[in-house]
């Protein structure tokens, strides 16, 4: 039984009232019902319909001052964005003659539950595959043996459910995942990246990656993946991530978004995964359609490995900043990747302070030189550009070693 109240879902009830008798041809489905049964207020409503409601949807969107657009015009799938994009309604026609048959074509039983828009207040759920019971038990069960093969991305969606909620797969479903695993290679890189990004960002990402190996999905996503070796490293890295997140400067950096849906935290985990392949291939990164920035960072992290860091309590703020900068490209990311391989709260604490000092000293993306290049050119016109670069580097090294500390000493 699921009963809704207009005060909690005003736009939904407004749409149902707008449809009038056509309500009997429209149903809340999928993740919306799942979220409602879990006691969560949905940020999006998935609505399936039998007869074509596109014209009515457009008029309703205009009345709500929303933004309506096609998701897939050929399949008659559209979306309405409300409240400045904070609330969305997704509309799609049934994929079968009846709602019951449509639900049987979905991925997992806990996503195969529906509620007619005419029953919003009475709560008559349509649950042909006992999805409510599976949801209550936290059980992931396929609607049939063929649904994963129909769309292999559903394999990763199931792994994502586990990663986010901790739900477990039935043994039969594990076998279905293994059967469908070879087909994952046919899925587009963009769709793979989206699901993988959700998995890496989720609380149970460690066990989720274990499931990727158990179901043979890791072999399709990351060829030559050394799973056992990775699980050992990942166990340590998971604990380190929890410690790192507790330090505010570091926690904020870990959540920094490098590209849509992909945070620095997720990229570091991905680097650990690539580190456990027998060889790093740009083709793996290219397949996931990662940005140039993310690709370059992953390449450097995997090829270079943990960096050498030697922060000290006695370091001045500027020296701390210079030590971070000397780590090279994306130095904060390289520092955090290094911390995943080490132990000790003191090193993390020193690193957190050093990150703060580095950010405070940045000007135009770098820590200013003690003796600038323009000054060197003016004082020593015979020096070539390459020689000036070498001297700037030597000065910074001498400054870090505390051999010099002012402009005069640098000159």
Image (cartoon, helix red, strand yellow):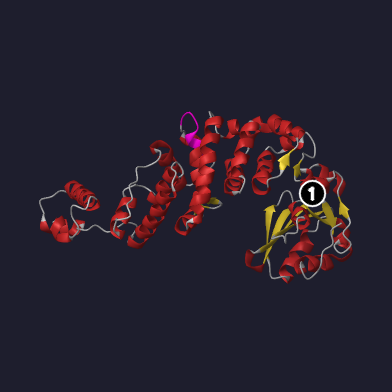
Q: Residue at x 61, y 32 (%)?
A: 213
State the quadrant of the C terminus.
Answer: bottom left
**Camera-nearest residue between 106 and 90:** 106
Residue 317 versus residue 191 in the image, above or below: below
First to last magenta residue range? 273-279
Q: Is residue 188 left or right of 402 when viewed as pictured?
A: right
Residue 145, how many percent across, how many down?
A: 78, 33
User: Which residue is at a point 59% across and 41% down the rendered structure image?
Assistant: 206
User: Percent position (x, y) of residue 302?
Assistant: 43, 38
Answer with left or right where residue 62 lies relative to residue 386. right
Q: Is residue 98 visible?
A: no
- Give the labeled residue for mark 1: 136
Viewer-proximal residue, 403 or 27?
403
Quarter of the picture containing the N terminus is bottom right
Residue 170 visible here: yes
Residue at x-position 83% and y-position 52%: 114
In the rendered image of this protein, does residue 218 appear above or below residue 317?
above
Rendered residue at 37%/42% (across/down)? 307
Front one among 55 and 29 = 29
User: Which of these two is toward me, 355 or 125?
Assistant: 355
At which x and y percent is residue 278? 48, 28
Residue 154 sits in which quadrant?
top right
């Amino acid at each position: 039984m699921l009963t809704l109240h207009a005060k909690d879902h005003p736009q939904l009830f407004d749409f149902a009232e707008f449809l009038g008798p056509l309500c009997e041809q429209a149903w809340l489905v999928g993740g919306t019902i799942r979220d409602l049964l879990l006691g969560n207020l949905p940020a999006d409503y998935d609505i399936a319909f039998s007869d074509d409601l596109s014209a009515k949807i457009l008029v309703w969107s205009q009345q709500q001052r929303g933004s309506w657009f096609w998701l897939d015009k050929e399949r008659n799938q559209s979306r309405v964005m409300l409240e400045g994009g904070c609330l969305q309604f997704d509309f799609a026609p049934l994929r079968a003659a009846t709602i019951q048959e449509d639900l049987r074509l979905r991925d997992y039983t806990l996503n195969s539950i529906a509620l007619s828009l005419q029953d919003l207040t009475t709560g008559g759920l349509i649950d042909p595959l006992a999805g409510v019971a599976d949801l209550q038990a936290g059980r992931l069960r396929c609607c049939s043996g063929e649904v994963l093969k129909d769309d292999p991305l559903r394999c990763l969606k199931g792994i994502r459910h586990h990663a986010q909620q901790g739900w477990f797969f039935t043994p039969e479903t594990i076998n279905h995942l293994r059967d469908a695993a070879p087909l994952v290679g046919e899925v587009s890189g963009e769709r793979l990246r989206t699901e993988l990004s959700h998995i890496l960002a989720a609380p149970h990402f460690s066990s989720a990656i274990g499931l990727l190996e158990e179901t043979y999905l890791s072999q399709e996503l990351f060829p030559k993946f050394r799973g056992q070796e990775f699980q050992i490293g990942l166990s340590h890295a998971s604990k380190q991530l929890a410690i790192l997140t507790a330090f505010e400067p570091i926690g904020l950096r870990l959540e920094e978004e490098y590209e849509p849906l992909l945070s620095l935290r997720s990229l570091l985990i991905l680097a650990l995964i690539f580190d456990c392949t027998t060889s790093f291939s740009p083709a793996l990164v290219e397949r996931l359609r990662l940005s140039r920035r993310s690709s370059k960072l992953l390449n450097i992290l995997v090829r270079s490995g943990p960096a050498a860091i030697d922060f000290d309590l006695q370091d001045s703020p500027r020296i701390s900043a210079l030590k971070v900068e000397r780590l090279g490209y994306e130095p904060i990311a390289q520092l955090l990747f290094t911390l995943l391989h080490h132990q000790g709260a003191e090193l993390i604490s020193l690193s957190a302070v050093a990150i703060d000092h580095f950010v405070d000293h940045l000007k135009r993306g770098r820590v200013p030189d003690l003796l600038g290049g323009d000054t060197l050119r003016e004082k020593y016109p015979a020096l070539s550009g390459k020689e000036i670069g070498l001297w700037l580097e030597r000065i910074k090294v001498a400054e870090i070693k505390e051999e010099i500390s002012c402009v005069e000493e640098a000159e």
